[in-house]
Image (cartoon, coloured by chain):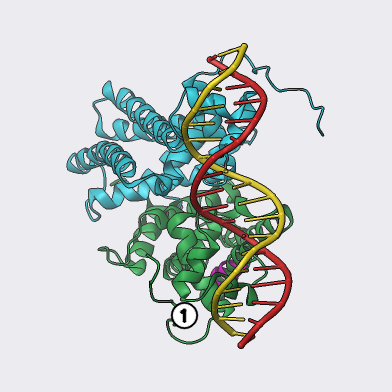
Chain colours: A cyan, B green, C yellow, D red
DNA sequence: GTCTATAAAGAGATAGAC
DNA sequence: GTCTATCTCTTTATAGAC
């Protein structure tokens, strides 16, 4: 118990802010932000507790940075995916696919961003909410254009259709497994079909 | 700071295990399980910290009990709602409505159960997972019957349709507000329409 | 059934050596 | 850039009085 080898050996090169965010995201998603200790993060990276404070100011900053990163990534993925499409329905489909694939390929970060918002202090939380609202506006605009083009329902508002779409897509983070039967692309196709056409047989 | 009045006055009668679960659910959902202290729970109820240990064994037991309660409630709500329906599509609709209404009317408990599973110790977590799987089996059976009756798609498995349905319904806990524009019934109708018919205009 | 007081452990973060 | 050592605060839970 006492003569355990010192874990001074880092697992693959020097610690960087990027590696810290990756590892923190993994642990925050596994155990929750509040239940994850800075001790565990340091241990996972093979360094002493004090060492991580050379790279970051606080545990909360780590959470904040990782939320910013995830929102930038998904926004950029969706914006790029719809950029070269002009058909309104194609744009909706491209958005669904990009959202699902981006969310699941960087799962820990996105999941942490989506579920640990309340752990941030008010100013930082406000900034993440602002970025999230910006992203939701993009989604809503794509939905709204499709409504205006006459290819989506107008019985429900763009906001309602947007919220329902994000419902359908986002909850996937709670059960998706990389070793499961369905790939992110498979799931995107399934959700696209259900969202646009419904599951009832006509 | 020192001569603050003692909060010995309870807010409406004696503390009970039921009141403890209610208040704990509210705080766990607001701040997360790990970030909520037993001090805060006691303070919210107007009693001293030590007093709550007369009613419960530990903070974790509180979380466990509240998860059990929420799963029993939603299961019972759905089972009752479909009991008097025989048409397969009516049963799917009744399930959607009961799930949404039950989830949103007892929002803190259901939300906590859905998101704080990982905070439980292994044996207790296993028991909640068992109860949750049982409930999901009920949902899947209703979906599967509708597929067999030829009123729902068979291109996707019952499991896939069930997961997509719970996606669409469950994420609502993250944005639903009691003072919002849509009532639980409104939302149930919206989700029913989207799930069965899709949002594309045909 | 609730109180006061406190034990015992664990947390985030910093100082200063190397 | 990472280390050892430690400060200071907060936490869950218990003991024993009333």
Which percent across, then down, holds residue A181? Answer: 63, 36
Residue drawn at x 39%, y 44% as measured from the top left:
A120
Residue at image point 29% right, 35% down:
A89
Residue A188 can be seen in this image: no
Look at the picture and state if B175 lies above or below A50.
below
Screen quadrant of the N terminus of chain B: bottom left
Residue marked by disc 1: B8
Q: As displayed, is residue A40 above or below residue B79?
A: above
Q: Which one is in front, B87 or C9?
A: C9
Q: How many labels does the image show?
A: 1
Q: Of D9 and B69, which appears nearest the observer?
A: D9
Of residues A114 and A45, the one nearer the viewer is: A45
Q: Residue at x 23, y 52 (%)?
A: A157
Asked if residue A39 lies left or right of residue D8, the reply is: right
Res C11 → quadrant: top right
Determine if residue A161 is in view. yes
The local crowd at label 1, few if under 14, some if 14 to 19, many if 20 or more residues have their Cα within 10 Å, is few
Q: Identify the magenta region.
A: B68-74
């Amino acid at each position: 118990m006492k003569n355990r080898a010192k874990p001074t050996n880092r697992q693959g090169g020097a610690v960087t802010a990027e590696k810290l965010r990756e590892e923190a995201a993994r642990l925050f998603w596994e155990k929750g932000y509040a239940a994850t200790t800075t001790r565990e993060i340091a241990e996972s990276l093979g360094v002493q507790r004090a060492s991580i404070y050379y790279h970051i100011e606080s545990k909360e900053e780590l959470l904040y940075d990782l939320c910013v990163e995830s929102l930038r990534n998904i926004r950029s993925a969706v914006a790029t995916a719809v950029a070269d499409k002009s058909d309104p329905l194609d744009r909706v489909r491209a958005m669904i696919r990009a959202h699902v694939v981006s969310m699941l390929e960087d799962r820990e970060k996105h999941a942490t961003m989506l579920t640990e918002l309340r752990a941030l202090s008010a100013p930082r939380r406000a900034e993440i909410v602002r970025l999230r609202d910006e992203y939701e506006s993009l989604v809503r605009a794509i939905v709204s254009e499709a409504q205006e083009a006459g290819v989506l329902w107008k019985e429900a508002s763009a906001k309602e259709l947007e919220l329902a779409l994000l419902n359908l897509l986002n909850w996937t983070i709670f059960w998706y497994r990389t070793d499961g039967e369905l790939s992110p692309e498979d799931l995107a196709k399934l959700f696209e079909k259900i969202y646009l056409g419904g599951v009832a047989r006509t």
